Amino acid sequence: MPIAQIFSDNLKVPVKVWTNDIDLISIEQLRNVASLPFVFRHVAAMPDVHAGMGATIGSVIATKGAVIPAAVGVDVGCGMLAAKTNLKKEMFDERDLGQLMTEILNRVPVGREQRKKDQIRTSACEPFEAPLAEILAKEPEMLKPMVRSDWRAQLGTLGSGNHFIELTADEDGCLWIMLHTGSRGVGNIMASFFISKAKELSKASGEVLPDINLASLKEGTEEFELYMKAVHWAQAYAMTNRQVILDDVLEAIRVLRPEVSLEGEIVNCHHNYVAQETHFGETVWVTRKGAIRAGLGEKGIIPGSMGARSYIVEGLGNPESFCSSSHGAGRKMSRTEAKKHFTVEDLEKQTQNVVCRKDVGVLDEIPGAYKSIEEVMLNQSDLTKTLHELRQVLCVKG
């Protein structure tokens, strides 16, 4: 489906939207972003678009000369990993899957848990030590919260909320490992620091913004350069975090199926990040806030909600979306609304063919709180093509 709506009245650049399913708050946030002087060409809103902090989740913002830290978000580098195994769905019954969940939870800390000292992956941490020391030397204020949040002990941890580890089956019954997580507490600390810094600088300059969460850091300043170092550090950390968890999940599977191995390439992609790219012949900063890169031939992952389909896709390189696509189904109901609207019985019904938690603690992640992933995929048929359609078999959440 091509672009569904375009908003352009009284804006610096137009807003191009790949869905008609969009609420008024999201429209206002998109218009606010499109009014900023440094936004390039247009703002692209993906079919999973919904309201966020200042900028919508499910939007792609290209800029020249500035970046908005709050648009990148606090879970810098949050994204997905998918890896195909040599195993088949019929090799696991419900009892096996229950045991596998236990084995995974014994190896991968979830929620607020961190790794114990003897579990820390020292070799995986080493490449991050010197660059982080350089960043902290220039902004020692970030050291205080990091004392309470050991980044080394967080490498290889899942977190909570919508983060998950899944075993999914494709159209041929082949099992894939899929997981969703980001840069954990250390990324949040860095992002929160620079979001506050951008707001301070904006207020000090007398700048008038439609929303203070759209405060930016200007290219050429010390703050911008340090933010870029920090955000790229966090993005690399998030990528490694997913790889470490994959290794642990494979170790858990080997307890039940020692013959497990991976087939083909591992897909590991961010959906909350910023990168310098070339679009429409110009070098720009591209912020993907709940969106993946979908350049021509590039593989990506678009997960549905817990109990729904997920997709391995290949990008079509559509320039109008800045070579991007949605990152998932997108929420249609807030976490608070979901808890009020649904019951544990509803959760059990909507996840009846998946081995997963079915308690009030994950009620806000019920499939009914999300948009239809099938409709999202239909709305972005000009952005990606489907390579594999996956169905959850096991889902582990914090």
Image (spheres, rainbow, N blue to C red):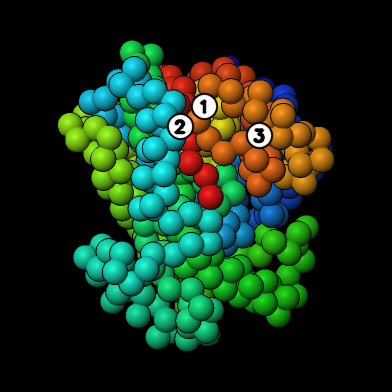
Disc 2: which residue? 394
Residue at mark 1 to residue at mark 2: CA–CA distance: 6 Å
**Figure quadrant of residue 236:** bottom left
In the displayed image of the protein, which residue is found farthest to the top?
172
Disc 1: which residue? 354
Q: What is the crowding at mark 2: few (fewer than 14 residues within 10 Å), some, or many (at least 20)?
A: many
Pointer 1 or 2: first along the chain: 1
Q: Residue at x 29, y 69 (%)?
A: 118
Q: How many labels does the image show?
A: 3
Q: Residue at x 39, y 64 (%)?
A: 115
Instruction: Give above or below for 108 relative to 199.
Output: above
Pointer 3 or 1: first along the chain: 1
Residue at mark 2 to residue at mark 3: CA–CA distance: 15 Å
| Residue type indicated by callout 3 | Ile
| Residue type indicated by callout 1 | Val
Residue at mark 3 to residue at mark 1: CA–CA distance: 12 Å
